[in-house]
Each structure stands twice: as C-alpha cells, then as structure tokens.
Image (cartoon, helix red, strand yellow):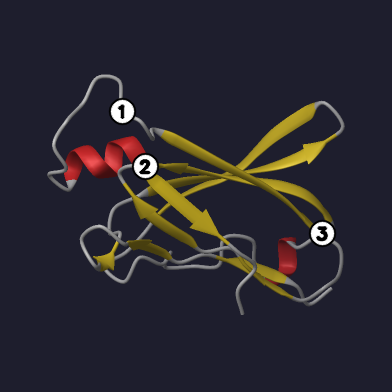
C-alpha cells in the first residue's frame, strides 16, 4: 500500500505553529487500543517524520491523541486548574491507500480538525 499519515498543528490563539506538542498514535481494533508511536511537533508544527509511513500503513481505525494541555502550559498560556482542553483525541478511519492528513487548529478554549491534503 502507498498510504501514509501526517499532521500539522497550528496555535490559532498565538498565530503560529504549535512547536513541542506531543502526539500519540493508536490503532483501534474492536475494543483494543494499541499504542504505535509517540512524536513531537517541530518548529513548523509538523512531525519530523510521517506519523504512519508507507511501509507501516494499514487500512483501519486510528486515533491521534494531542497533548494540548502540556503544550499550552509550556507556551505561556495562563494556567487554569483543570485546563479546559488537556488531551484531545481524534479518532478516524483510513479506508484507502492514500495520503491522510489530520491537522489540528488549537486555542486554549477550542479546536477543529478536518481531512487535509
């Protein structure tokens, strides 16, 4: 298969890429959630490698877990206890061998995502 998975995280409150944000990738099979990889975003808000590269790509259900609270703490966003957004899970399916891009637009009080290109 020639599919692969990428992301791009933008801090919409600060108007910049979200550097240093930890992301976990899981594969979901029925009730089983298997951790595949942990990555951190670079100064452009992207990971230095594909989250799921071509050689590891399989159709199925996956979950990206964005550790927004830790990022917001490190970026100087005023603290609150507990944070409104701490961990953001995004569960999605990949049904064909193609490029899946799952970006995250993040602020301290909201986020959005979509299937990008």
**What secondary structure is marked by label 3?**
loop
Specify which label sits upstream in the sequence, 2 or 3.
3
Specify which label sits upstream in the sequence, 1 or 2.
2
Image depth: mark 1 or mark 2 in front: 1
* Residue closer to the observer: 46 or 35: 46
Above or below — where is 58 with respect to 15? Answer: above
The residue that disc 2 covers is 68
The residue that disc 1 covers is 83
User: What residue is at 13 percent from the left and 37 percent from the top?
Assistant: 78
Above or below — where is 92 with respect to 34? Answer: below
| Neighbours of disc 2 within 10 Å: few (<14), some (14-19), many (20+) | many
- Position of residue 8 measured from the top left corner of the image (x, y, whole percent): 45, 66
The residue that disc 3 covers is 58
The quarter of the picture where residue 1 lies is bottom right
**What secondary structure is marked by label 2?**
helix
| Neighbours of disc 3 within 10 Å: few (<14), some (14-19), many (20+) | some
């Amino acid at each position: 298969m020639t599919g692969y998975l990428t992301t791009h995280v933008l801090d919409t409150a600060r108007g910049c890429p979200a550097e240093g944000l930890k992301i976990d990738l899981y594969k979901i099979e029925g009730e089983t959630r298997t951790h595949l990889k942990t990555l951190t975003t670079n100064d452009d808000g992207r990971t230095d490698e594909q989250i799921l590269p071509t050689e590891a790509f399989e159709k199925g259900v996956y979950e990206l877990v964005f550790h927004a609270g830790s990022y917001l703490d490190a970026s100087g966003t005023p603290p609150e206890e507990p944070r409104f957004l701490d961990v953001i899970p995004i569960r999605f399916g990949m049904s064909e061998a193609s490029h899946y891009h799952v970006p995250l637009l993040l602020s301290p009080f909201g986020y959005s995502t979509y299937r990008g290109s």
